């Protein structure tokens, strides 16, 4: 009996319980951000460092694709790369006719989430150049994000997919964050908040897909347990990023929130 | 002077020279195929074994994406995965609303090259099941294809991209092959030849893109030399596949063509 599979509801409940316990919405720096307590410098520090996470997401998802022999799963997973990178030849750099692409998604150039985040940076006073050169990147943030990418490369693909399930908790966080930014940080150009707006919808779809795949392909008790641990690991990644950012930009507010 | 870069024309010429020397259109088994000398059994053996190559292409291209930090390159390269895998939820297996996808390419389900190859198999009398289970896969073919995927995982991404440049020589081969199949193997349902038809166009676009990327990013003499070697390696992969297939299915025709 102890070696039997958890049923789907039990497994899903154990995954959700990780979020209740460890998702980064409860990190002191995140609480301060949503309560409007961050200085412009601290907010810019968060935006600049979080960009390193954003820019590595397609690399991480391509690693999962590359480890996954199940075409049906790849056909679903690939849209994450399109969503973050965008598709098509960048304007003015085309070396051949982009209109010749065989698939609808590649027929034109579409903005991805990484470009949307660069616009968030600009709305906060950070140039795309500063972000693309990782000029403000903290070592602790780099190590945490690199650990996540390496996890996706090295782990069995259903476990790497389970680690993405922090998206289960993201829509609520994004909705709260969007309201907080509009209320407390009016110095940020509202057009820069598009990334959060689109992610509310995307994260819901993405987590539905990732949860369905995890429930189907984590089909031994050991894989189910690994999946729950993987989600805990991913929460640690997000938490460690905020630890490093808090340490660098939080100052005395961190000690006495 | 010997340590300076080759100019673009010299570099491109050295790449093309590899194809003239080593591309698999000159392999005895391939010559026999295009001269109409293959038995149905040998042709089926080729289709079944070549399928292992086809099904690994998206895995290989995802490995390249995952190694490539240049978003502009990823935005171009990703369409290869879409072209081979197709995109979207397979019919009847959708666990969420595929219509909610944010990008045009993911809004609907699109057939990829792997499905087209399965239809080629059916047109030859091979069930999708036989191909998907690798029932006819020869060890030599498996080793060659796996070597190619591992090369893409392990090598710097511009070198892995250069290894794909056998596509420079593919459109001519596909055009010749299509005519040969229609002329010499009328027992194959012509609808099954769609894969070759679409690849004439796709391979031209793909090789234009891959050549432009190679010329831009193989920007040291050492990288240029590695790129030429990588293309030679890729020709060896295709050649070794035909060696194994020839050995298994070619019989006495191989010894005395």
Image (cartoon, coloured by chain):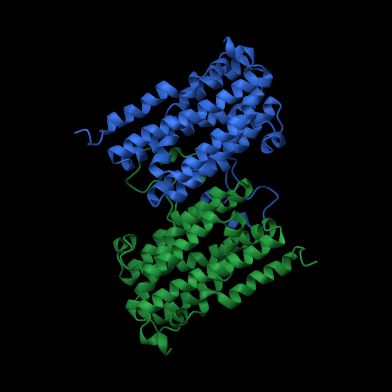
Chain colours: A blue, B green
> Which part of the image, by quadrant, shows the N terminus of chain B?
bottom right
| Location of residue B111 by image quarter | bottom left
Residue at image point 35% right, 78% down: B249
Residue at image point 33% right, 67% down: B122
Question: In terms of depth relative to the viewer, which is nearer, B21 or A96?
Answer: B21
Question: In terms of depth relative to the viewer, which is nearer, B140 or B64?
Answer: B140
View extreme (right): residue: B1
View extreme (bottom): residue: B256
Q: Is residue B123 left or right of residue B167?
A: left
Work out whether residue B37 can be spotted. yes
Q: From what the image shows, is residue A28 above or below residue B121?
A: above
> Which part of the image, by quadrant, shows the C terminus of chain B?
bottom left
View extreme (left): residue: A1
Residue at image point 69% right, 30% down: A122
x%, y% of residue A189? 67, 24
Total numbered labels placed on residues in the image: 0
Q: From what the image shows, is residue B111 above or below residue B231?
A: above
| Location of residue B201 by image quarter | bottom right
Work out whether residue B186 can be spotted. no
Q: From what the image shows, is residue B162 above or below residue B94?
A: below
Q: Is residue A44 left or right of residue B39?
A: right
x%, y% of residue B80? 52, 56
x%, y% of residue A238? 51, 28
x%, y% of residue B228? 63, 67
């Amino acid at each position: 009996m102890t070696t039997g599979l958890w049923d789907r509801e039990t497994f899903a409940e154990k995954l959700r319980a990780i979020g209740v316990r460890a998702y980064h919405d409860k990190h002191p720096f995140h609480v301060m951000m949503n309560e409007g307590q961050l200085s412009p410098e601290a907010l810019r520090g968060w935006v600049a460092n979080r960009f390193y996470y954003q820019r590595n997401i397609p690399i991480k998802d391509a690693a999962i694709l590359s480890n996954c022999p199940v075409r049906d799963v790849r056909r679903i997973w690939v849209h994450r790369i399109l969503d973050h990178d965008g598709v098509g030849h960048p304007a003015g750099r085309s070396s051949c006719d982009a209109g010749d692409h065989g698939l609808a998604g590649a027929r034109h150039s579409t903005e991805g989430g990484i470009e949307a985040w660069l616009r968030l940076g600009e709305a906060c006073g950070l140039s795309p150049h500063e972000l693309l050169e990782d000029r403000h990147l903290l070592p602790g943030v780099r190590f945490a994000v690199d650990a996540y990418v390496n996890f996706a490369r090295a782990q069995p693909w259903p476990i790497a997919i389970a680690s993405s399930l922090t998206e289960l908790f993201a829509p609520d966080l994004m909705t709260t964050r969007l309201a907080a930014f509009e209320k407390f940080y009016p110095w940020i150009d509202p057009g820069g908040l598009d990334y959060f707006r689109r992610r509310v919808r995307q994260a819901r779809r993405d987590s539905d897909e990732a949860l369905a795949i995890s429930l189907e392909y984590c089909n031994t008790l050991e894989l189910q347990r690994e999946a729950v641990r993987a989600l805990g690991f991913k929460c640690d990644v997000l938490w460690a990023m905020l630890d490093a950012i808090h340490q660098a930009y939080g100052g005395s507010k961190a000690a006495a929130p």
